C-alpha cells in the first residue's frame, strides 16, 4: 500500500503549540553512492511541511530489484515480500506516531516523527536485541554451562544472518517458518573453523530449541504477535550409548599419565563411574555430603543440579580411595570441596 498520496494532506487545523500541518509524506529510497558488495542501503524519508528527516532502515538491496517510483522492492521472491512487509510495518508505525501527535496536539515535525519512531520500543524489537535481553536476564537463573550454550546459539544466529541475509540483525516481525528452516539447513552445513565436525541432527535441534525458547519469550512480552515456531517440530534422534565393560574400566584406572592434570581428570572420571554422578554434581561435593548409612557404611547424599532430585549413593571402595587422595589437596581445602575444581 502506497501512502504517498494518502498522507499528503492540506490542513487548516492549528493549535497554540503548532502551526498548520500542510503535508505529511513517507517515502523509501536507495542511496546509490553507498554501494557495498553490490547492494545499496535503503533509507526512509519523512517529509512534513517540506522539511525532511531521513534514516537508514538497516536493510540493503540490489539496484535492479528496487522500484524507485513506488519506493518498494520488486519481484515475487519470499525475501522481497518479507522486505516489503517490513517497509509497510515501518510506514504504519510512523503513521501511528503522526496520528497520536495530531490527537495530543503535539508539535509535528519530520524530525520529531523520526525521533519518535527510532526512540520507541519498535526500534528495540530485533532478534539480536532479544537474544541479548534473554542472556542478560537469564544470567542469574541458568547455570554457567547452560548459559554458555545460549551464547553459542547466539553466535550461530549472527553468522547465519550475515551469510544468508548480509545483515547484522533482523526485525522480530520478519522471522517466519522459512527463516527457521533455512537456519536449520545452515546449522547442518556450517563447517566450524575451530573443530572438525559439523553439527549433527541433535546438535542442530538444540540450537533451534534455544532459539524457540527465546522467541517464546518475545511472544510472552508481546514483542511479536505470532510465534513462528508454532508449526515447527523439533526432531531429536535417540541413540543407545554404550557402557565400559569391567576390563575397559580397569585399563583406565591403571593408566598413568606423565601430566598431573590428566591423572586428575582420570580420577574424576573413574569417580563418576563408581557413583553415577555427573561432572557438575561431582564438582559441588563437600565433606558435608558424606554421611553414615544404616549399613554403617559411607554414603554420598546430595541433589542433582538438573532436576534437583535427591541422590543417595553408596561409597564403594574405589570412590572412597579417590576422595581420600584429594582430601588434603590445598585447592580442594581452600574451596571447601571434596575435589579441586577443574574446567569441564
Image (tube, grey):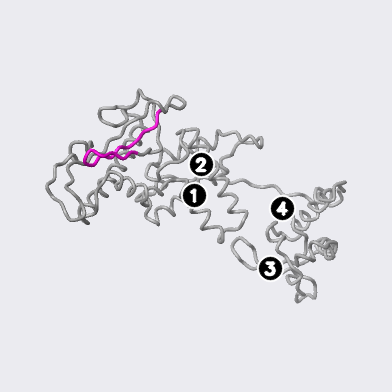
Dot 2 surroundings within 10 Å: few (below 14), some, or many (20 or more)?
many
* Picture disc at residue 302: 3
Is 53 covered by the magenta stretch?
Answer: yes
Proximity of marks 1 and 2: CB atoms separated by less than 8 Å: yes
Question: Foreground residue, 182 or 168?
Answer: 168
Left or right: residue 117 versus residue 145 is left
* Picture disc at residue 157: 2
Residue 321 placement (x, y as % from top left): 85, 62
In primary-sequence order, the first of circles 4 and 3 is: 3
Considering the numbered disc 1 on the image, is that residue within a helix, a strand or a loop?
Answer: helix
In primary-sequence order, the first of circles 2 and 3 is: 2
Q: CA distance from mark 2 to mark 4?
A: 26 Å
Dot 3 surroundings within 10 Å: few (below 14), some, or many (20 or more)?
many
Proximity of marks 4 and 3: CB atoms separated by less than 8 Å: no
In the image, the segment drawn in magenta is 40-54
Number of marks in the rendered image: 4
Q: Nearer the viewer, mark 3 or mark 1?
A: 1
* Picture disc at residue 131: 1
Dot 1 surroundings within 10 Å: few (below 14), some, or many (20 or more)?
many
Residue to which mark 4 is pinned: 343
Which quadrant of the figure has residue 327?
bottom right
Of helix, strand and loop, which mostly describes the magenta segment? Answer: strand
Q: Quadrant of the N terminus?
A: top left
Amino acid at each position: 500500500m502506497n501512502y504517498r498520496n494518502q498522507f499528503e494532506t492540506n490542513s487548516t487545523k492549528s493549535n497554540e503549540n503548532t502551526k498548520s500541518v500542510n503535508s505529511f509524506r513517507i517515502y523509501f529510497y536507495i542511496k546509490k553512492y553507498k554501494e557495498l558488495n553490490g547492494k545499496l542501503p535503503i533509507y526512509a524519508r519523512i517529509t512534513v511541511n517540506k522539511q525532511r528527516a531521513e534514516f537508514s532502515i538497516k536493510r540493503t538491496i540490489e539496484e535492479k530489484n528496487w522500484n524507485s517510483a513506488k519506493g518498494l522492492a520488486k519481484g515475487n521472491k519470499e525475501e522481497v515480500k518479507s522486505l516489503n512487509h517490513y517497509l509497510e510495518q515501518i510506514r504504519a508505525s510512523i503513521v501511528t506516531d503522526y496520528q497520536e501527535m495530531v490527537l495530543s496536539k503535539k508539535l509535528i515535525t519530520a524530525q520529531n516523527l523520526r525521533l519518535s519512531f527510532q526512540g520507541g520500543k519498535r526500534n528495540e524489537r530485533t532478534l539480536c536485541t532479544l537474544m541479548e535481553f534473554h542472556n542478560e536476564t537469564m544470567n542469574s537463573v541458568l547455570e554457567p554451562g547452560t548459559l554458555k550454550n545460549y551464547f553459542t546459539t547466539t553466535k550461530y544466529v549472527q553468522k547465519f544472518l550475515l551469510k544468508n541475509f548480509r545483515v547484522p540483525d533482523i526485525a522480530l516481525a520478519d522471522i517466519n517458518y522459512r527463516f527457521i528452516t533455512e537456519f536449520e539447513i545452515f546449522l547442518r552445513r556450517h563447517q566450524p573453523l575451530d573443530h572438525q565436525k559439523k553439527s549433527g541432527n541433535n546438535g542442530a535441534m538444540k540450537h533451534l530449541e534455544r532459539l524457540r525458547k527465546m522467541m517464546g519469550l518475545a511472544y510472552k512480552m508481546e514483542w511479536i504477535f505470532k510465534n513462528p515456531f508454532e508449526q515447527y517440530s523439533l526432531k531429536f534422534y535417540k541413540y543407545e550409548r554404550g557402557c565400559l565393560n569391567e576390563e575397559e574400566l580397569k585399563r583406565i584406572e591403571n593408566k598413568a599419565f606423565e601430566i598431573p592434570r590428566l591423572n586428575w581428570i582420570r580420577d574424576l572420571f573413574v569417580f563418576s563411574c563408581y557413583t553415577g554422578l555427573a561432572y557438575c554434581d561431582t564438582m559441588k561435593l563437600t565433606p558435608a555430603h558424606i554421611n553414615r548409612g544404616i549399613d554403617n557404611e559411607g554414603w554420598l547424599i546430595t541433589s542433582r543440579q538438573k532436576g534437583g532430585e535427591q541422590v543417595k549413593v553408596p561409597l564403594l571402595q574405589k570412590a572412597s580411595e579417590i576422595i581420600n587422595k584429594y582430601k588434603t589437596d590445598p585447592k580442594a581445602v581452600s574451596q571447601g570441596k571434596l575435589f579441586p575444581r577443574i574446567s569441564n
